[in-house]
Image (cartoon, rainbow, N blue to C red):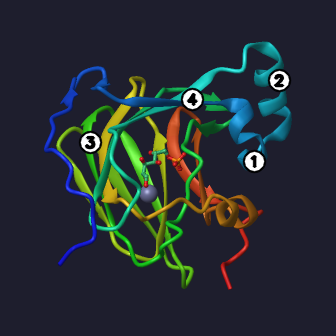
Amino acid sequence: MSVMKIMKPFNVVINFKTGELSPGKRVLRRVSDLKPLFYNQKAAEELIHHDDPLMYEVIYADVPEEGGHLGHCTTILYPGRVGEEFFFTKGHRHEKLETAEIYFCLQGTGKLLMESVEGEFEVLDMFPGSSSYIPPYWSHRTVNVGQEPLIFYCIFPGDAGHDYATIERHGFPQLVVERNGKVQLIPNPYWKKNV
Ligand code: S6P
Ligand code: ZN
């Protein structure tokens, strides 16, 4: 016999063009919220002093953060750069490492960077209709490499949790930059392999 509270089924409505999820709870992230994560700290400081641009919004459906439930949300990652680096999400691994996630892309063009706890690195393209499976044990970060907002829908176990500190300490093995008008992945000189 389950000890979970029985809750009522419900709908949320997602606007595929804008990423609006309603009803939902919105979290905003500006350049200042990601400050330590940028390769070019001077470029980040300049942007923060100028108008501290909004990088992304996450809109969460109201679901208990408990095992058995499925958290779900949309992310709207705006186009832009800090120095050469395209706008990206903080990136995290799940506190409960053995939990997976699905990213379903609705609009825009992106890269999904992933690193396993053993230090393997993988990148998937995100485009309207792409449905990316992030298996257990992989950190994940999205990067908008296009001119439009990158909008995607995420589904994850309710008790997954977010570990941001590990990414803040180690970074990802590669950076996604614009060089000579092209999208390029280059080694991150500050990356420290997870051990
Ligand atoms: C949650 C899921 C996404 C991200 C969101 C923002 O597990 O992976 O909803 O939270 O895309 O990224 P971040 O790294 O700031 O949480
Ligand atoms: Zn996640």
Mark 4 or 1: in front is 4
Q: Are marks 3 and 4 in contact (CB under 8 Å)?
A: no
Residue corresponding to mark 1: 39
Based on the displayed image, in which of its 4 quarters is residue 188 positioned? bottom right
Based on the displayed image, in which of its 4 quarters is residue 80 positioned? top right
Which amino acid lies under the numbered mark 3 shown in the image of this protein? Cys
Q: Report how far apart the C-alphas of labels 1 and 3 lie in the structure.
A: 26 Å
Q: Report how far apart the C-alphas of labels 4 and 1 lie in the structure.
A: 16 Å
Q: Position of residue 146 (x, y in %)?
A: 41, 31
Residue 105: which numbered mark, if any?
3
Mark 2: few, some, or many residues within 10 Å (few <14, many ≥20)?
few
Q: Which of the marked residues, 4 or 1, is nearer the chain's N terminus?
A: 1
| Helix, strand or loop under label 2 | helix
Residue corresponding to mark 4: 55
Residue 46: which numbered mark, if any?
2
Which amino acid lies under the numbered mark 1 shown in the image of this protein? Tyr
Mark 1: few, some, or many residues within 10 Å (few <14, many ≥20)?
some
* Identity of the residue drawn at 46% across and 29% down: 26
Mark 4: few, some, or many residues within 10 Å (few <14, many ≥20)?
many
Q: Report how far apart the C-alphas of labels 2 and 3 lie in the structure.
A: 31 Å
Q: Is the C-beta of the residue carrying label 2 under 8 Å from the nearest atom of ligand 1? A: no
Image position of 54 (left or right of 26): right
Which amino acid lies under the numbered mark 4 shown in the image of this protein? Met
Image position of 31 (left or right of 67): right
Q: Which of the marked residues, 1 or 3, is nearer the chain's N terminus?
A: 1
